[in-house]
Amino acid sequence: MPHEAGRLAARYLQVIEDDIVPLTEAGVEKGNKLFGAAILRKSDFSLVVAGTNQERLNPLFHGEISALNAFFALPASERPDARECLFLATHEPCSLCLSAITWAGFDNFAYLFAYEDTRDAFSIPHDLAILREVFGVEGGAYRHDNAFWSGRSLAELIAAAPEEERPGLAARAEALSKVYARLSDIYQSRKGEGPIALA
């Protein structure tokens, strides 16, 4: 199990670095938020699709929704079953995206940044506010293991990796934090330029 956790964490970090960040950089330049997602095959961790926030097109097109739209746009003959896939989000999915992941049939998801990071490091507090005000869930304390899926942070996977792999994985996660801090600065400097709800 530790080696599997380390291998999975390394692959998730690679997908964020190589596949999600380039999409998000382009999206942020257009005024979109810095959230992204990807779907991988469980069998070999190969990428199926990646997506990024497209709120300028539609405020419902969060990073996870964009990835799901790309996934379901694939021809049925080329699209794996959702239960055969891994769902990766850069940021802990909001209530909209938790529901979308559920309705789409995925039995898992992982994320790099927790709600508290989204609120504190990226100045986007809406996820926690909606969970509290609409659902009465304090501190984002939804059930990470339930009848539909299991949700895990990359921090948990890194902690479960072999001890000798953890420093390298943690360093990569920290490097991504700096990338996203830069993207956040760009987004925050431009977010008032368009009529996006909750922006």
Image (cartoon, rainbow, N blue to C red):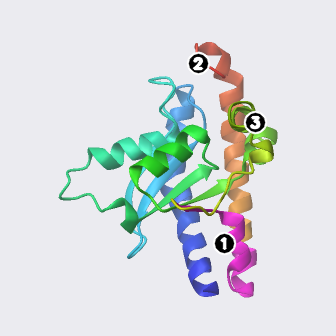
What residue does disc 1 label?
Answer: 157
Query: Along the horizontal axis of the image, is 76 left or right of 160?
Result: left
What residue does disc 2 label?
Answer: 196
Along the polypeptide, which appears first: circle 2 or circle 3?
Answer: 3
Q: Secondary structure at mark 2?
A: loop
Binning the other alpha carbons within 10 Å of mark 1 as few (below 14), some (14 to 19) or many (20 upward) gives many
Binning the other alpha carbons within 10 Å of mark 2 as few (below 14), some (14 to 19) or many (20 upward) gives some
For the point 43% across and 50% down, the residue is: 50
Binning the other alpha carbons within 10 Å of mark 3 as few (below 14), some (14 to 19) or many (20 upward) gives some
In front of the other: 74 or 31: 74
In the image, which disc is placed on residue 147? none
Majority secondary structure of magenta residues:
helix
Q: Secondary structure at mark 1?
A: helix
Quadrant position of the N terminus in the picture = bottom right
Residue type at mark 2?
Answer: Ile
- Residue occupying the far left of the picture: 77
- Magenta stretch, residue numbers: 149-168
Query: Along the horizontal axis of the image, is 170 left or right of 50?
Result: right
Q: Is the residue under label 2 in contact with that under label 1 (CB below 8 Å)?
A: no
Residue type at mark 1?
Answer: Leu
Indicate whether 104 appears above or below 8.
above
The percent position of residue 184, horizontal first and vertical second, equals 69, 36
Indicate whether 154 appears above or below 24.
below
What residue does disc 3 label?
Answer: 132
Quadrant position of the C terminus in the picture = top right
Q: Is residue 152 magenta?
A: yes
| Cα–Cα gap, marks 2 and 3 | 21 Å
For the point 58% across and 13% down, the residue is: 195
The percent position of residue 46, horizontal first and vertical second, equals 39, 68
For the point 73% across and 67% down, the residue is: 171
